Amino acid sequence: MKLILTFLLLLLYSSTLPLSALAANASLSLSKDRRFVYLSFSNLKKVSKVNYTLVYDSSSGQKGFEGGFRLNPKTSRSSRRQILGTCSSGRCVYHKNIKNVSLDATFTLRSGGTLNITKSLP
């Protein structure tokens, strides 16, 4: 009986560990001058599409943006650099006092399911 229980526990552990290790993930960081946010998406081979929303507080109120992209099956990671401000005719105006940055990402899996991840920075 102990042998069967040990085998079942080992089987459960070995079958769940790779799934969590292969799960799609997202991360974000701010540039030192807080004018840009860097978004990184990893473990994407089982993902067909990524949609994301980023919101943050600035001295002029809450701001944000949405984005998304489709993936081919060989892509395992993707990154984006996004200005925290607006640009027009080659001139950019940066938002000031950036804080409370929050990223919500939805990964559409090739198997048909979805995975939602939220990350935040102070």
Image (cartoon, helix red, strand yellow):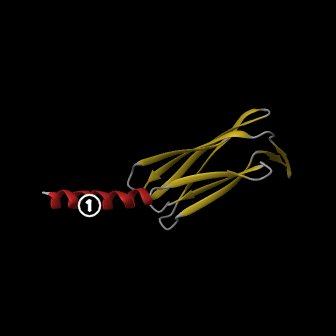
Picture quadrant of residue 38: bottom right
Q: Nearer the viewer, residue 24 or 20?
A: 20
Residue shown at the point (22%, 59%) measured from the top left:
6
Would you say residue 84 is visible in this rendering?
A: yes
Q: Secondary structure at mark 1?
A: helix
Give the residue number, with chain letter if any, for mark 1. Answer: 11
Q: Quadrant of the N terminus?
A: bottom left
Tell me where residue 66 appears, x and y as whole percent.
63, 44
Residue shown at the point (52%, 54%) measured from the top left:
25
Would you say residue 22 is visible in this rendering?
A: no
Picture quadrant of residue 41: bottom right
Please state the total of marks drawn on the protein image: 1
Farthest residue, direction bottom: 74
Q: Tell whether 54 sits left or right of 2.
A: right
Query: Three-letter amino acid code at disc 1?
Result: Leu
Q: Tell whether 49 sits left or right of 1.
A: right
Tell me where residue 49 appears, x and y as whole percent.
51, 53
Q: Tell whether 4 sits left or right of 63.
A: left
Tell me where residue 94 appears, x and y as whole percent.
82, 44
Farthest residue, direction top: 61
Farthest residue, direction left: 1
Residue shown at the point (50%, 60%) measured from the top left:
44
Q: Quadrant of the C terminus?
A: top right
Q: Tell whether 94 sits left or right of 102.
A: right
Residue shown at the point (67%, 52%) measured from the top left:
29
Tell me where residue 84 appears, x and y as whole percent.
75, 45
Q: Residues within 10 Å of mark 1 (few under 14, many from 20)?
A: few
